[in-house]
Image: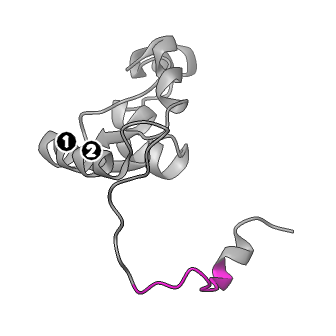
Amino acid sequence: CAGGAVYSPALTDFIFMVRQTSYLFITGPDVVQSVTNETVTQEELGGANTHMVKSGVAHAAFDNDIDTLLRTRELFNFLPLSNKEQGSVIRENDDSPDRLVHSLDTVVPL
């Protein structure tokens, strides 16, 4: 996805990307090089890792299309069919909702 349409995914609830094949950027590497004289790849400019680690636009990245589609289906199983319905899947776990995570105190400086 390139150009103005790249803004739309950033406004959605979930973004899944495929490593080495999914890209989101306003303008491509050729334009960046002609304007800044800097050589940059599609992956560096707007690949899955860039949006997972740096921009935070992507919520998950997978190695291939099949894994991405399977995880998308898994996500959809958590979602209700409408806003009037409860979600259908609840996963049991031993993680207490009252658990304290002290490392979170350092995420935002005071």
Q: Horizontal placement of 4 versus 69: left or right?
A: right
**Residue at 55% across / 43% down in the picture?**
55
Q: Nearer the viewer, residue 85 or 99?
A: 85
User: Foreground residue, 91 or 102?
Assistant: 91
The three-letter code of the residue at mark 2 reads Thr
Q: Is residue 15 left or right of residue 66?
A: right
- Residue 11 colored in magenta in the image: no
| Residue 36 position in % (x across, y down) | 56, 21
Residue 70: image location, x then y, percent: 18, 48
Residue placed under numbered mark 2 in the picture: 72
Q: In the rendered view, would you say 107 is above or below 68?
A: below
The residue located at (53%, 48%) in the rendering is 54
Tell me if label 2 and label 1 are in contact, CB under 8 Å. yes
The type of colouring in the image is: one colour
- Residue 79 x, y percent position in the rendering: 38, 46
Tag 1: residue type? Leu
Residue identified by numbered label 1: 69
Say which of 53 and 35 sits in front. 53
Majority SS type along the magenta span? loop
Question: Which structural element holds mark 2?
Answer: helix
**70 above or below 107?**
above
The residue depicted at 67 percent of the width and 84 percent of the height is: 102
User: Crowding near pointer 1: few (<14 within 10 Å), some, many (20+)?
Assistant: some
How much space separates mark 2 and mark 1, taking CA atoms?
Answer: 5 Å
* The C terminus sits in image quarter: bottom right
| Magenta highlight range | 94-103
